[in-house]
Amino acid sequence: MSDEDITLTAGDAEVTVQPGNGGRVGGLRIGGVELLRQGERFGCFPMVPWCGRIRDGRFLDGAEVRQMPLNAPPHAIHGTVRDHAWRTARTSTDEAVLTYGLVDPWPHPGVVTQIVALTEDALTLTMSVETYESSFPAQIGWHPWFNRNLGGEDVTLDFDPAWQEERGDDHLPTGNRLDPKPGPWDDCFGMPGGVEATLTWPGQLELKVTSREEWVVVYDEQREAVCVEPQTGPPNGLNTLPRLVTPLEPLEATTTWSWRRL
C-alpha cells in the first residue's frame, strides 16, 4: 500500500496518520478543533530505536561501540525513523497499521510496527520492535506536540512523578534523582506506577496521557506547544538502561490519550 496520508474517524474525532512523514500522527481533531501543533516536524512522531539524546551519538552494543549521526550536535536525538517513509500494512475506518524496516545507520535488522487505533473518546498508539537475527538494545517512545492554546486559555499540565532526573549542562541525565521542580521543563521524570498526565484547556477539553511505561519527558519551553512523551527508558538510555530486543522477545509499548469535553 502507498505512504499517502490516512484519515481515521470515530464520532466527532478525526486523526490524520502520515506514513510518508516518519509514521507520525499529523493531526487530532475533536469536534473540528486541532489539538496537535501543525507542520512537517510536529504532530506526534514515534521515537525509535531510541528516545531523546544519546551522548555523543555513541552507545554500547554488546562489546561494540556504535556511532549514530549527530542530528542534534553534539548528540544524536529521537531515533532514526521519524525522517523516513513507513509502509501502510492495513487500514480501516478507525485503525491504521504501519511498518518500518530498520536500515543503516542503525546496525541491526529489525521491524517496527505501529498501530494507531481511534475511538470516540480515545486514541491508542501501540508500537513494537522485532528482530529475527541478532539481539540489540532499543527504546520506544512518542513525541506529541499538543497546542498550548485552542482558542481560549492556555493549557495546564498536571502530573505527579516520583522523581525528576537531574539534567546536566549537556541536557542528559546525570544519574541523580531529584524531587520534581517547577517548570518550564525539558526534563525526564520517573513514574514507577505508569505514566499519567492530564492536560486541561480550561472550559474546553481535558486530555489524559497514560502508559504502562515508567518514564516521561516533558518539554514545554516553546510558546506554541507542550510535549508529554511516554517512553521505555530515559534519555541516553541505550547506555544507562538498555532494553534488549531479542528474536524471542520484541520490545513493545502503548500509550493512550483519552479526552472529555468540559
Image (cartoon, rainbow, N blue to C red):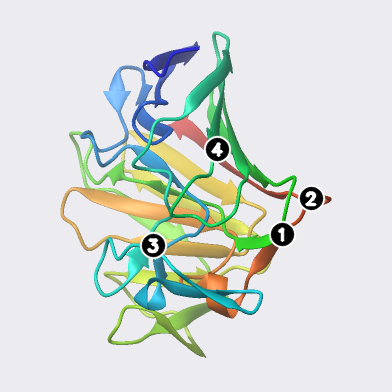
> Taking the image as drawn, is residue 61 in sight?
yes
Q: Looking at the image, which is closer to me, 78 or 32?
A: 78
Query: Is the C terminus in the top left, top right, bottom left or bottom right quadrant?
Result: top left
Tell me residue 166's x, y (percent). Answer: 42, 85
Q: Residue at x 70, y 47 (%)?
A: 131
Q: Which residue is mark 1?
A: 135
Residue 218 is labelled as 3
Q: CA distance from mark 2 to mark 1?
A: 7 Å
Which of the marked residues, 2 or 1, is nearer the chain's N terminus?
1
Callout in the foreground (3, 4): 4
Q: CA distance from mark 3 to mark 1?
A: 30 Å
Q: Which residue is mark 4?
A: 101
Q: CA distance from mark 1 to mark 4?
A: 15 Å
Which of the marked residues, 4 or 2, is nearer the chain's N terminus?
4
Q: CA distance from mark 3 to mark 2?
A: 32 Å
Q: How many marks?
A: 4
Q: Residue at x 37, y 17 (%)?
A: 5
Vertical relation: 133 (above or below) 27: below
Residues under numbered marks 3 and 1 in contact, where contact means CB atoms less than 8 Å apart: no
Circle 4 — which element? strand
Apparent side of residue 130 relative to residue 260 in the rendered image (left or right): right
- Estimate how packed mark 4 is, as few (under 14), some (14 to 19) or many (20 or more) residues with alpha carbons within 10 Å: some
Q: Which residue is mark 2?
A: 247
Residue kind at label 2, given as amino acid type: Pro
Which quadrant of the structure image shows residue 167?
bottom left
